[in-house]
Amino acid sequence: MSQIVIPDPDGDVSRPVFVLAAPRSFTSLVTAMIGQHPELYGVPELNLFQCETIAEFNSGKSADGQGKSPYWSAMRHGLLRAVAEIYSGEQTPQSVAMAERWLKRREDQSSVEIFRELAAKVAPLNIVEKSPAVLRKQEYMQRILETCPKARFIHLVRNPVSQCKSVLNAKGGVGVLLAMNSVDHLGEKAALEPQIMWHDTQIQILRFLDTVPEDQFITIRGEQFLSNLDESLPALCRWLNISESPEAIAAMRRPEDSAYSNIGPSNAPLGNDVNFLNAPALREGNVKSPPLDSELSWREDRAPLHPGVVALAEALGY
């Protein structure tokens, strides 16, 4: 059996790209676009770094026995699809079953070891990944940095008004808000308030990026990025120090060509936002960014954004 060569975490081989963003912030589209670059390898949401060990990943329970998420069975799909595709070249019920066995045999290994093994398998390409749930705890993000000290991070932001509306309208959006404790208890009755998630997610990301060298992260406003791809894609390639050739840029404009940009087999259909999986093609054009003082349609009083949210959005360039 050939020996697996794990890339040196301090070397240039393992320089993955992680997209950090709140849910419904163009994450699926932008990550898939970047991952289609011929020097990179886009994967689904792995959710690896929420776990210390693969036993934890397989069971969905932390070492203290506490469940990670009521949606954990679905949150495993991304890694299963990635293992199936990387090791068997296809995603079928049979190859996903193989991936389950692959993970079962590695239960005593750490998530760090598994990520490095996947990185070695796709090398010299560098992995591009996003798992919004990793933003729940600083320790999860720190685990990424400890695993890959030279990783690049993209802080992807969406206008809070449109992001909040998108979460509320998305399939499963209410569940995401509840999982992220986005509930306003100040009124006579508790009510879902998506701007809490937007605000708290940005704060979590900014706190983490304070620990990252400045040349290893960049902030991108999604509306601006997607509205001017002729400039934004080459600029991002220059920042990542990868080719900005016409062929590379053309590949990035075809996120639907990814092996993961579709509904997967019956035993691992997800691994990404279901809305993206059902319609993964890029629809080019101007992406609107509504005024920060807009009346909020989801609020009974139609009040605008909280002043703290406005201040943070303005600090991020809105």
Image (spheres, rainbow, N blue to C red):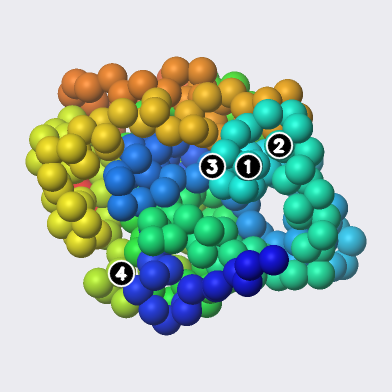
Q: Check the picture and name the quadrant holding the C terminus.
A: top left
Discs 3/4, front? 3
Left or right of 69, for residue 193: left
The foreground one among 262 and 123 is 123
Discs 1/4, front? 1
Q: Which residue is mark 2?
A: 95
| On screen, residue 181 above or below 119 | above
Kind of residue at disc 4: Gln
Dot 4 surroundings within 10 Å: few (below 14), some, or many (20 or more)? some
Q: CA distance from mark 4 to mark 2?
A: 35 Å
**Image marks 4 and 2: residues in contact by CB distance under 8 Å:** no
Q: Which residue is mark 1?
A: 88
Q: Which residue is mark 4?
A: 216
Discs 3/2, front? 2
Please tell me which of labels 1 and 4 falls first in the chain. 1
Discs 4/2, front? 2
Please tell me which of labels 3 and 4 falls first in the chain. 3
**Image marks 2 and 1: residues in contact by CB distance under 8 Å:** yes
Residue 30 position in % (x across, y down):
35, 39
Please tell me which of labels 4 and 2 falls first in the chain. 2
Please tell me which of labels 3 and 2 falls first in the chain. 3
| Element marked by disc 1 | helix
Q: Which residue is mark 3?
A: 44
